[in-house]
Amino acid sequence: MAKRFDLIVFDWDGTLMDSAAAIADALQTACRDLSIEPPSDARARHVIGLGFQEALRQALPELDPELYLEVADRYRQHFLSQHHKLVLFDGVVDLLRALAERGFLLAVATGKSRRGLDRDLEVSGLAPRFLATRCADECHSKPHPQMLLELMEEFAVEPKNTLMIGDTSHDLQMARNAGVLALAVAYGAHPRAALEAELPLWCAANVAEMRAWLLANA
């Protein structure tokens, strides 16, 4: 069967790695360390996927920007203290293997820093699966389309032949801004209703559902 897409771009946190809860907790704990009122769970999870400064602007709109570096430092300490506990979602390794065997080009577009993504790729063993990656400290934050535009240019793939997969409305909005179709996953940071409001091609409840959809429709 002919492929509909050539390039499949994945978000990382909340899509491939089960890290959304750890990210939200690290941000809230960093705020408490500095006697800053922490964001609610919902607000903390909503900003996952954004570049860190943009995340702070949305999660803590009244925070003095001069405190961003202190919050970032505390956040990093707390997140790294939990990092050894983080795992890929069940089925991710087999999914990526199946897609690679079918000839899809695989890439990552994430709100993580380059250092953070490289660490995760090494620890997870997934680095060889992705032909290119883009991070928020080297591109505009989602939902700006720069990450997708650069990846499509690198592989000379048209928007109509590119699919973005993510667990947040930021991912789906980035796809729309780049003229790319998107698949949502409802097991990460954002609730299903918020994802469906962005009109993705489909919304998968778990990795097994995502795999079945991709192998039948991508």
Image (cartoon, rainbow, N blue to C red):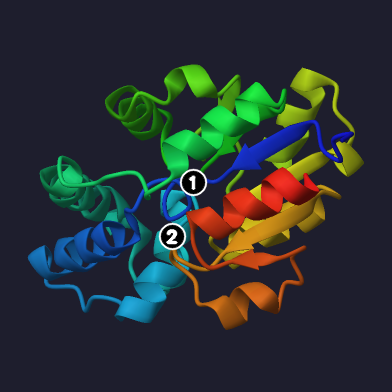
Q: Are marks 1 and 2 in contact (CB under 8 Å)?
A: yes
Q: Position of residue 195 (x, y in %)?
A: 62, 72
Work out whether residue 60 can be spotted.
no
* Residue 150: quadrant of the picture: top right
Q: Which amino acid type is marked by label 2? A: Ile
Mark 2: few, some, or many residues within 10 Å (few <14, many ≥20)? many
SS at badge 2: loop
Q: How far apart in space, not on screen, are marks 1 and 2 (Cα)?
A: 8 Å
**Viewport quadrant of the N terminus:** top right
Residue found at x 55% / y 24%: 130
Nearer to the camera, 25 or 186: 186
* Residue 154: quadrant of the picture: top right
Residue found at x 80% / y 39%: 162
Asked if residue 90 lies left or right of residue 187, the reply is left
Q: Position of residue 137 (x, y in %)?
A: 48, 36
Label at residue 111: 1
SS at badge 1: loop
